[in-house]
């Protein structure tokens, strides 16, 4: 859930910053969300997916699993 959440927030925020969705009420706050803050949700979700897939692959390969 973190990966799509972060992706949507970054994508919609970037659209709002370009003015496609109208003039943002607080462009400074939106910039902080789009650039340093929301990408962390995207990265966190991607890292969790990678960890889960690695764990799954390791457990399938083990003789006791």
Image: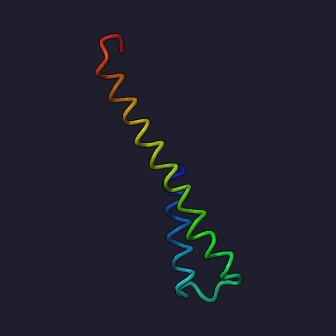
Q: Position of residue 49 (x, y in %)?
A: 43, 43
| Residue 20 located left or right of residue 52 | right
What residue is at 71 percent from the left and 84 percent from the top? 25
Q: Position of residue 34 (x, y in %)?
A: 57, 70
Which of the 4 quarters of the picture holds residue 28? Answer: bottom right
Q: Position of residue 54 (x, y in %)?
A: 37, 34
Number of residue marks: 0
Q: Position of residue 58 (x, y in %)?
A: 34, 25
Which quarter of the rendered picture does the C terminus lie within?
A: top left
Which of the 4 quarters of the picture holds residue 27? Answer: bottom right
| Residue 48 located left or right of residue 26 | left
Q: Name above or below for residue 65 compared with residue 10.
A: above
Q: Residue furthest top?
A: 64
Q: Name above or below for residue 48 compared with residue 21.
A: above
Q: Name above or below for residue 58 compared with residue 51.
A: above
What residue is at 31 percent from the left and 22 percent from the top? 60
Tell me which colouring the rendered structure shows. Answer: rainbow
Q: Name above or below for residue 48 compared with residue 25.
A: above
Q: Residue furthest front?
A: 36
What residue is at 31 percent from the left and 17 percent from the top? 62
What residue is at 45 percent from the left and 49 percent from the top? 46
């Amino acid at each position: 859930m973190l990966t799509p959440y972060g992706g949507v927030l970054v994508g919609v925020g970037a659209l709002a910053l370009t003015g496609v969705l109208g003039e943002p009420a607080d462009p400074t706050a939106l910039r902080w969300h789009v650039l340093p803050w929301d990408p962390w949700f995207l990265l966190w979700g991607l890292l969790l997916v990678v960890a889960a897939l690695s764990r799954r692959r390791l457990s399938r390969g083990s003789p006791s699993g």
